[in-house]
Image (spheres, rainbow, N blue to C red):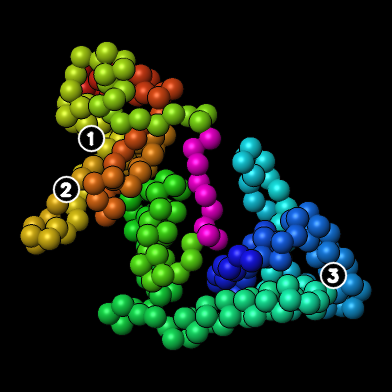
Amino acid sequence: MENLTVFEQNGKLLTDSRDVAMMVDKPHADLMKNIRSYCKHLNEGDFSLVEYFIEYSYKDGKGEERPCYLCTKKGCDMIANKMTGKKGVIFTAKYTAAFEKMQDFISKGSTYSGISLKEQVESLEVVAGMLHMNEASKILMLEGFYKSYNIPTAFLPKYENNGSRQLRSATSLLEINKCAISAVRFNRYMMDAGYLEERQRPSSSGKPKTFKALTEAGLKYGENAVSPHNQREVQPLYYEDSFMELFNFVVALSIAS
């Protein structure tokens, strides 16, 4: 029987019905039918559904939206009440422990230098916004943060590029398109056009270290991804299908000026 991942969302402790289905060794479709039946009875009894189950969705391997539920501890109680024997006992023990563990973690208000966990997450979101990070990079940053506190990360979405727009570095695209300029010169053209900017971060030596990031205008042609060399930096990646449009524009702008 699998362990259960519990996470906080909008002040509620929740778990995913897919995780519950795996934990109780039941097809997710069958558990969904059960939950819908519970919701019907709860509605008839004029109970608040969100205290038990919250309708949600996820993307399957084909990128298609599929329904699921987020379950509160009360919801898990209801599922457990319909189970008997060893499986029901073990499920009850495990989900109770998982919810208590997360509640204990939150109630202790884990802090770093006096900063609460909630405030740290909010700070990460501010930084991600300032750096214009793409969704994949935001998720990667959050995943690394949660792992530093030994918090399960299964609840985070698994972001994958859908392949419709290939992202590559400027160096790679300049070579592929046989552009007769270096990445250094291209970056200079990009900065002159206002599509690229230089940012700074503190380094271990105490001296600021610079890195480049696409500006709001530059995001039309690419995305800022977490740098593989340092997660406190981003690196610009460009859409392959519109790179030459961008290249021709910034080169022409440079010549005109």
Is residue 160 covered in magenta?
A: yes
Task: Name the kind of residue labelled 3 in the image.
Answer: Tyr
Residue at the spot of label 2: 210
Q: How far across and down, in percent of the image, does residue 68 sit?
A: 71, 57
Q: Secondary structure at mark 2?
A: strand
Residue at the spot of label 1: 191
Task: Name the kind of residue labelled 1 in the image.
Answer: Met
Mark seen at residue 38: 3
Q: Residues within 10 Å of mark 2 (few under 14, many from 20)?
A: few
Indicate left or right for 66 with 148 as reference. right
Q: How far across and down, in percent of the image, does residue 186 sit?
A: 22, 26
Indicate left or right for 192 with 99 as reference. left
Q: Is residue 184 above or below residue 201?
A: above
Quarter of image, res 125:
bottom left
Instruction: Identify which residue, 244 or 29, lies in the foreground.
Output: 29
Instruction: Identify which residue, 73 or 198, lies in the foreground.
Output: 73
Q: Earlier in the sequence, mark 3 or mark 1?
A: 3
Magenta region: which residues? 154-162
